[in-house]
Image (tube, helix red, strand yellow):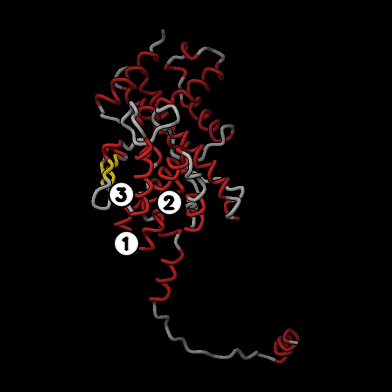
Amino acid sequence: MTQLAPLITSFLREHMPHQRGYSPRSCETYAFSFKLLFEFAAKRLSIRPSLLTIENLDATLILAFLRHIEKERGNAITTRNLRLAAIKTFMRYVEYRVPSALEQTARIHAIPAKRHDQKLIQHLTIDEIRAILNAPDLATRSGVRDRAMMHLCFAAGLRVSELVGVLAENLSLQNGGSVMVRGKGRKERCLPLWKETARDLRAWLSIRGTVAVPELFVNARGEPMSRAGFEYILDKHVRKAGKTCATLRGRNVSPHQLRHSCAVVMLQATHDVRKVALWLGHADIRTTEVYLRMDPNEKLEAVEAVIPPELRRGRFKAPDALIASLLSDMGA
């Protein structure tokens, strides 16, 4: 066993969850980053992952890995930066335990995050949302569950991890209905439910039956719904909705687009980005401001609210006969 193996094990199993208090989802995300890194390094060096050493993970290999996930895996630059951040966090852990690797870790810390274009966020219109929510067959148990899941994801603006992590005990259908959600950073927020959303959730609870897990949504085997499971369900109903809604045909809709769509609806209804930030559970309002860029109504109202300056008008006169004749020819 090399020195790398016990280091990465203690980092993921002890340092992150117990010393730093990272959530299980964050630990899983970090573990997946290192899984990709070790697979790439082992293939590049033609050795087994268990034989990798700390010295193998130098700045040259890390840069090659970052190019690999961009070019070959087709990951976005934001994902590339997240993988780099995970590696740097581990290297800070290594610094205190392997002093001989200080120069090596310093070179890795010097690798900059990559700048990228900030494109407008993709979202769905109300008509598209309605078509997707109407796609499930409500005469079946799975159809009732699917409608309730997608409706709650949209209406509450949930991340997919928040959706599949909702506990049945945290759902209240009394006095209009509300749901308690645990989001990023283990921050909890309580959200009221629309009457239509509460109705769909009540229909699901009536046929959910007795299951051995506390999660609100379960699969056909009675196990907690997974992220991949919900992504499959959403994709299935988007394709079905495309038969009646032309703008959905051939379109890939991610669960996060339901969250974005909720944010746009909330912003149009409240005209207050702070309320949208509270609803979505954003720690920094600057994260929410991206929705201001994507909503043309906000810009139109700003234009209409401004009184343009009154300008003096004039008429251009040609300075000589040659220019005047050219202008008259162009007018003809």
Rendered position, 33 above or below 194: above
> Which residue is at 40% across, 15% downward?
4
Q: Pick the residue in front: 90 or 9.
A: 9
Left or right relative to 193: residue 4: right
Q: Amino acid at mark 2?
A: His
Q: Pick the residue in front: 212 or 270.
A: 212
Q: Which residue is mark 2?
A: 260
C-alpha distance separating marks 3 and 2: 16 Å
Q: Which residue is mark 3?
A: 284
Question: Which image quadrant is residue 34 in?
Answer: top left
Q: Amino acid at mark 1?
A: Asp
Q: Which corner quadrant holds the N terminus?
A: top left
Find numbered disc 2 in the image and state the secondary structure of the residue it sits on: helix
Question: Which image quadrant is residue 316 in?
Answer: bottom right
Q: Give the mark, 3 or 2, whose residue is nearer the N terminus.
A: 2
Q: Pick the residue in front: 182 or 236.
A: 236
Q: What is the x, y in percent for residue 305?
A: 38, 76
Q: Which residue is mark 1?
A: 272
